[in-house]
Image (tube, grey):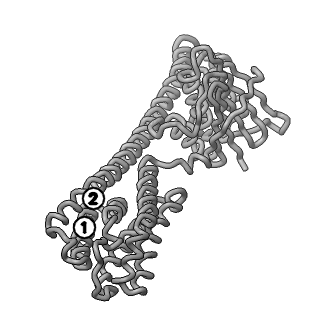
Amino acid sequence: MATYSPPISSLSAADDQRDQTAGLRILRQMALFVAVGYLAYAVVTIPAITASLAVMDTWWTALALPLVFGTGIMLGPLAWRASARRVKTATTVATAGYLIAIGSWWFGWNGQLLDGTDIWFSMFCGVAAIAAAIALRPGYAFAVLCIVVAATVTINHTVRTPEFNGPLLPDMAWAFAFSLIYFAAAVMAMRTAAILDSTRAQAYTATSEAAAAQARTAERLRFAQLTHDEVMTTLLAAARQDASVELAQQAHRALTALDESATTEVGACVSAADAVAQIRAATSAADPAVRFQSTADTAASGGPQYLLEAVRTIAAAAAEAVRNSRRHAGPAAGTWVSVTANQGRLCVEIVDDGVGFDPRRVPAERLGIAVSIRGRMAHLAGGAATIASRRAEGTRVTLEWSAH
């Protein structure tokens, strides 16, 4: 086998578990957008907050600031690492914090009026509505938008000196229209996220069903080959000639083959030679030009034994890796398959010297790696898959199974 060993960035099955779905990525981006909005308004509204101290009791301001800005800004750190459930919970808290602040405003107002300045929380009611769009269903989020717009505009008209107030309804309509643009964008973003995740889940289901159908087809083909090669041949020989030692041996081989074909229950094992043969057959069927080598440790009594389920899973994953190499590595690329069979351990490496890729940037809709290689090996007890690649430096896929 060629001594090709590219310096590569790898992505294992454990890394794959941390992959973000499209919906989670959009959710985190929207949460980060809201957090940045709250942070920006916390700076911009400092003069308005200072002015409001003349008309609001200190206890209310001390309570309202963390309720509004604290809960909103905390979405930033959570957007990087937290789960979807925690991010949605945090956006719900941020929405509730804003509603509590404006709902308790009356109790903190000392009756004085602002001279030409808006109350500070009225300047970004749309941000609270966007947080609601992330956390709640569209209908409930729209209700929050209507409540915060109506409440903040009404409070503004109440707390400002009358000469600075315009007509209430036009002011309310303008604030609603302005906030509605960003609110609608947030609702559409979350709807798109839900559609993407649903489509991705359907694609995974379809791929799994296709894999199951392929397995059934392969099993039917195996039995058809067994029937033709062993049973029918023996019966034809028996019909054409009298009983003989050769015919008895042929019949014995047919019965042995039938018995072996039935040992597919959990725990069935095959030898190292059979394991290597199955992997060779699967990878050669995927690409007849693949170069193959194997190393088997047969020092132990009777040679190594491997679970048939493990061998078939590795063979299928290796075949998918070879197909991927054939499709994407480039016309001039070579592909090598190396099998190492030790006591209680089976390792297959598929290496090519093609164009390579960045494993962390594989689109979610590309299921060959996620489902047919890493997903297949992840469902095998003792199995693991590592995919390592770098642009212009080739790809290495390592499939391992250990009995311990």
Residue 227 percent across, percent down from the top left = 51, 24
**Amino acid type indicated by mark 1:** Val
Query: Secondary structure under badge 1?
Result: helix
Of 117 and 158, the residue lying toward us: 117
Q: In the displayed orientation, state which residue is furthest to the top.
A: 240
Q: Nearer the viewer, residue 89 or 375?
A: 89
| Residue 358 image point, x, y percent | 59, 34
Q: Horizontally, is 118 left or right of 398 in the view?
A: left
Would you name the residue on which mark 2 appears? 179
The kind of residue tagged 2 is: Ser
Q: Measured from the top left, where is residue 220 in percent x and y? A: 47, 29
- The residue that appears at 51% across and 28% down in the rendered structure is 223
Residue 304, placed above or below residue 327? below
- Which residue is denoted by mark 1 in the rendering? 149
Relative horizontal placement of residue 123, taking residue 251 as reference (left or right): left
Alpha-carbon span between mark 1 and mark 2: 8 Å
Q: From this viewpoint, is residue 226 visible?
A: yes
Residue 302 position by quadrant: top right
Question: Which residue shows up at 54% across the image and 58% down it?
Answer: 81
Q: Is residue 266 visible?
A: no
Discs 1, 2 touching: Cβ within 8 Å: yes
Quick one: quadrant of the N terminus? top right
